[in-house]
Image: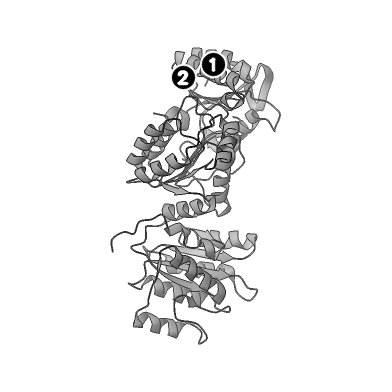
Amino acid sequence: MLDGLFRPGSVAVIGASNNPFSIGNIVIRNLVTYGFKGPIYPINPKERSIRSFRCFKSVLEVPDDIRNLVAYGFKGPIYPINPKERSIRSFRCFKSVLEVPDDIDLVNISIKNTLIPQTLKECGDKGVKFCIVHSAGFKEVGEEGIQREREMVALAHQYGMRIFGPNSQGIQNSDPEVSVYANFTFVPMKPGNISIIAQGGGMGELLKLHLHNVGLGHRLYCSYGNEADLTMPELLAYYGQDPGTRVIMMQIESFKDPAAFLAVAAKITPHKPILAIKAGRTHEGSVAVSSHTGTLVDQAAMATAMFAKAGVVEFHDSEQMIKAAIAMSTQDPPRGKRIGMVTNTGGPGIQMVDEAVSHGLELARWSEAGRQRLAESLYAEASLGNPVDVVATGGPEHYFAAVDTLLKEEGVDMVCVFFVTAPFVDLDAIAAKIKEATAGSPKPVVMVVETSSEYYRLGSTACAPATSPSTNSPRTAPAPWLPWPATPS
């Protein structure tokens, strides 16, 4: 079990510093800000305190990443470790983990790679079980780094410790009972039901940012880097068993153990969707992967075959993967392929029709009763076909009538609503009415909001979760439904 990694009771940060731009300082900030409930121990032999925490010289001194732990409210103890500091972010700083009087569940390490062996020995003597190694300079730099990585893992295993990383960003768990933000990134942590596994930290952060920009959060997050010890399949298995995870998104650069991935993924996908992007699909891309995490294997064709066999949905576009993940996390699958559309302008409506049909969806037909209700509720100039065009001056009541009518039609499996902002309509009122119309309906709905970035966020956030996901282009409107198999009517 990986509870010591994803649900730690206490965290020590080795390499903690009073420099606000250092990895150790940022980790402490995030732990505290997001409500970590356990103790935090900064480890630095040169500091007395960091962020108001007493600083320890070694993990062996600890009694029970720092900026992020603070910022995101980690409720456990936090122990900064730095031999040169007395305190960091109001935490007493320890020179070593050996100074900390209490047990430590998780250690974040952000020091020079040459100092890691001695640090791991101290962590082992302290009884630490999990170490997140942020430090780089291992497999990704060549033979010397490969040997350094092997020796690090072998040393950790002598003490029964597991290494997450190296060259890794860290982990997050937004469960309010845990609230651990044990990495050094910037996207705010907010509870959600989409979990993310990313080999590359930058790509993982962008996936979180996509969710944040439409007002959504995530559940578990990890960016595992070189995968020297703890493997991606082990992490995936933990996600599969997590009751708070409804959808899993993955960014994969290489497969260290393809057979293990296939076995784990195949067990998860029957009850929990896995969406994945394989980076390095071209030869040139695989060369770039080598310089990033130290692997050079052209695995694109193998990845596609494995994904298909295990029931993993493969994407080549992160935006489309995000839209699908949001749809799967907020709505039930459509019963079939029949789509009904609502728009307030003709051109984008036509484009939505083209995109939907080209992707295998079918245009729904209204019943006579449904058509009559539309005629009675909309302006005389409105088009009553598919898509329904409420015209540019259509207001909240017109959108409500159109969406409500389509959702009640037996011949409609899903609804796409297009809205382009205009100075003579009230975006907030229209969003509220669309949300009201969709409340309680089992049929999935997607919003297309074409407007400025500011209004897009306002509109899509106002409509969520009833009409999640939102997109800003008719071209991507069908994307959320494409990975879903239709359920029996």
Q: Give the percent coordinates (x, y) of residue 278.
A: 49, 42
Kindly identify the residue that appears in the image at 35 percent across and 73 percent down: 409
Q: Is residue 65 above or below residue 389?
A: above
Of the pair 53 and 112, the residue shown nearer to us: 112
Secondary structure beneath dot 2 equals loop
- Whether residue 143 appears in this view of the structure is yes
Which residue is tagged 1?
120
Which quarter of the figure has residue 374?
bottom left
- Residue furthest right in the image: 19
Q: Are marks 1 and 2 in contact (CB under 8 Å)?
A: yes
Left or right: 405 as drawn, with respect to 218: left
Disc 1 versus disc 2: distance between alpha carbons?
A: 9 Å
Q: In the rendered image, which quarter contains the N terminus?
A: top left
Left or right: 24 as drawn, with respect to 155: right
Kindly identify the residue that appears in the image at 37 percent across and 78 percent down: 366
Inspect the image, locate mark 2, and give the three-letter code of the amino acid beneath it: Met
Q: Is residue 455 above or below residue 165?
A: below
Q: Give the percent coordinates (x, y) of residue 5.
A: 47, 29
Q: Give the percent coordinates (x, y) of residue 209.
A: 58, 47
Which quarter of the figure has residue 303?
top left
The disc, 1 or 2, on the residue closer to the chain's N-terminal end is 1
Q: Is residue 312 above or below residue 379?
A: above
- Whether residue 59 appears in this view of the structure is no
- Residue furthest front in the image: 283
Inspect the image, locate mark 1, and give the three-letter code of the amino acid beneath it: Leu
Q: Which disc is residue 161 wearing?
A: 2
Q: Local crowd at mark 1 within 10 Å, few (<14), some, or many (≥20)?
A: many
Q: Is residue 359 above or below residue 430?
A: above
Q: Give the percent coordinates (x, y) of residue 127.
A: 47, 16
Q: Which disc is residue 30 wearing?
A: none
Q: Local crowd at mark 2 within 10 Å, few (<14), some, or many (≥20)?
A: many
Q: In the rendered image, which quarter contains the C terminus?
A: bottom left
